[in-house]
Structure formats: structure tokens, C-alpha cells
Amino acid sequence: MYRLIASALMLTLTLVVAQAADDKKDEKKADKPQSPKEMFQELVKKFRTTKDKDAQKELFSTYSEKFLSYAEKHKDESGATALIYVLQLPAETNDAKAKALTVFKKDYARTVKLGKMVKQLPANPLSKEGKEITDLLKDVAENNKDKLTRAFAYKALIKQSEQAADFAKRLKDDEDLKERFEKARGKDAVQFVESLAATSEKDIKSYQAKLDGDLKGLFVDVAVGKPAPEVVSEDMDGKKVTLSQLRGKVVVLDFWATWCGPCVGMIPHTRELVKKMEGKPFTFVSVSADAKKDTLAEFIKKTPMPWTHWWAGNEKGVIEDWDIEAYPTIVILDAKGVVRKKIVGANSKAVDAEVEKLVKEAEDNKKSE
């Protein structure tokens, strides 16, 4: 369990450091108080050297109180960051999480410009505080003074609904998974997931309608059922490539990186899929988020990946425009360029099923022309 916690802490730290690179220049001045980001880095450093579980729990408790104290004194984006850290910590800090939610609702949800950070709220509906966080997201989406913050909150709600629907489908299709989940969480948890999935389609349409209304045009919209926005990227030879050049084929865009274990784990299965679809209206494109193209090139030399590769890097571009936050993220387009499926995580079965359906659809449409 604690190994998982350590991984989660490392991942959160990586994301935070990447997102905050521009605002760290003045944070280390001696006369400034320790920022939430610096506190979190300190927490991670201490966690690495603390082996006793009771001591680790005490560490989480101590820093939860530090984050809460900071948020009480700084009613701005940095204070919101401190509260989000509390909500991302392990279950041992549930009392602190409850306090963080209370402070967030009272002092931040409607008045603080949160922007993209609102998507870092861990809206897992199966967690103890899951419903409260979902309600918080709804409050932010409906009432925050900043339009962009509201838009990101709706996107977070859409993502939550999509994940609930996807997990419910996995439980339905995989009896072993359902049995293990039921054994771990109980029948009520299974029923709860199914109830969320039952309303997910309606909820997604409602949230998307908000994004298509007063909040339209705030950022690139990569929504299921809509034409994919144009993508301009770079191939391995440094040439400019565009998504529109692939129109007429079913396209799988696989956002990945060589450092992503689940991404690498999918490679053998992807080889089989690409071979199976040879000669059909289909193309597979891996879009790399590796910081250096040379890293990607060296990896491909050693690991056969016989399909199209684009390099996006970890700077601005399609990764940011399409709001890719986790790897792998797989976006599947039909032959008309419409987004038909978004999959977050390594789920080869879901990719195969959607590809086979869309390729057959494309072939049938071509025959009827």
C-alpha cells in the first residue's frame, strides 16, 4: 500500500513541478514563507526516508495541518493548491480531508480563480469523500466567478462520468474483476458504480451543453461525438504533420511516453492490432510526450513499433491543447474524423473493440457509395 502511496506522491510532485515551472523563480527568497509546493517537496523527501508506517502516518498528519494552516491564511491560488494536496493524501488523513473540503467550499469554490488546477481535485466517486468532491466540482462549475475555472470544472465532471461508465462496463464484461471488486468493496459498491453509469450519458450531455453554451471557445474541445480539432505535430524526420491528412481512415491517437510503464506494456498488443488491420482503412499514431526526440528515437531502435510516430514533447502543443493529463490516453476517430472514443489507461480490449467496429463501419460505407 505504502509503495503505491509513494508512487502517487512522486507522480503528483512531477505534475506540480511541471505546471509550476514559471512561478518558482521567486519562491526561495529567505524572507518568504514556505510555499505549498515547497512543503510538498519536503514531505516527499521525508517520506522516502521514513520506513515505519506509524511514522509515515504521523508525517501525513503533520503536513496536512501545515497545508490547512496555509490555506486559512492565503485565500488565493496557492491556498487552493495546499487544499488539493490534502485531498490527494492517503486515507489516514480523512479528518484533514473533511476540513479541507469545508475550507474549499467556504472560501474558494466561488471566489478564487482556480483555472486548470480544479481538475486536480481527486473526484473518485468510490472514495469516502467522493460525493462531497463531486458536489464541490458542481458548485465550482455553476458559481465560480471565473469562466475558465467553471469550464475546467465541467470538464472534470465529464471525465468522472466517463470513467464511471467505463468501469461499470468493465465490471459487466469481466466477471473476475467484478468478483474481486465486490469482495473488496461489497455489493453496495458494485450497485453504486452501476447507478453512476446509468446516469453518466445524461450527465455528460448536460455538462457538455454548458461548455457549448456560455463557455464555448475557451479551449480546444475534444469531445466524443464531435469532429476532432486539427492537430499540427512533428514526425520523426522533423516534418510538420497534420491530423486532417489521415481523413478517410479510422485513426487511433495513442498519447504516450517511453517512461510510462503501462504505455510500454501495450506495445506487443498494438503490434498485433496493427498487423491485423493491415490493408484496411486504419492507421495507428503514437504521439510521444518525451522531452527529447532522441529519447524516442533510441527507444524505437531497440523496441520495434512498426506504425506512425509523432513527437509532441512535454511543452505546449497538442498535449496541452488536448488537455492530456495521464498516459496512455487513447483517442479513437472514425473515418470522417469524428471522436468516437477516449480511453485513459492501458485497456487494449476496449481499443480493439472500438477499432473493429469503426473499421467495419468504414468498409460498409465505402461499399454502399
Image: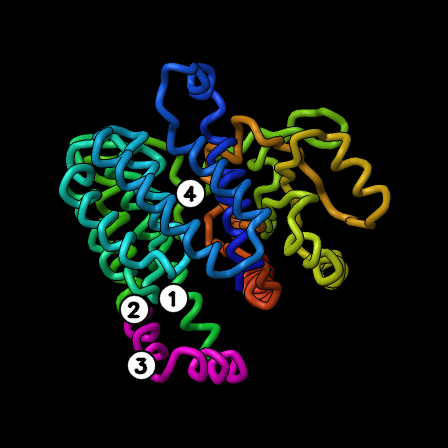
* Quarter assignment of residue 152: top left
Residue 166 higher or lower than 48, as above or below: below
Residue 6, numbered circle: none
Foreground label between 4 and 2: 2
Foreground label between 3 and 2: 3
Does the residue at mark 4 contact the one at mark 2 (Cβ under 8 Å)?
Answer: no
Residue 188, numbered circle: 3
Foreground label between 4 and 3: 3
| Residue 289 in the image, given as x and y percentages of width and height | 62, 37
- State the SS at label 3: helix
Q: Which residue is mark 1?
A: 165
- State the SS at label 4: loop
| Residue 322 in the image, given as x and y percentages of width and height | 46, 38
Dominant secondary structure, magenta: helix
Query: Is residue 245 one of those drawn in magenta?
Result: no
Does the residue at mark 3 contact the one at mark 2 (Cβ under 8 Å)?
Answer: no
Q: Amino acid at mark 1?
A: Ala
Q: Which residue is mark 2?
A: 196
Q: Within 10 Å of the Cα at label 1, are there few (<14), some (14-19), or many (20+) other Cα atoms?
A: many
Residue 222, numbered circle: 4
> In this image, 316 relative to 117: left or right?
right
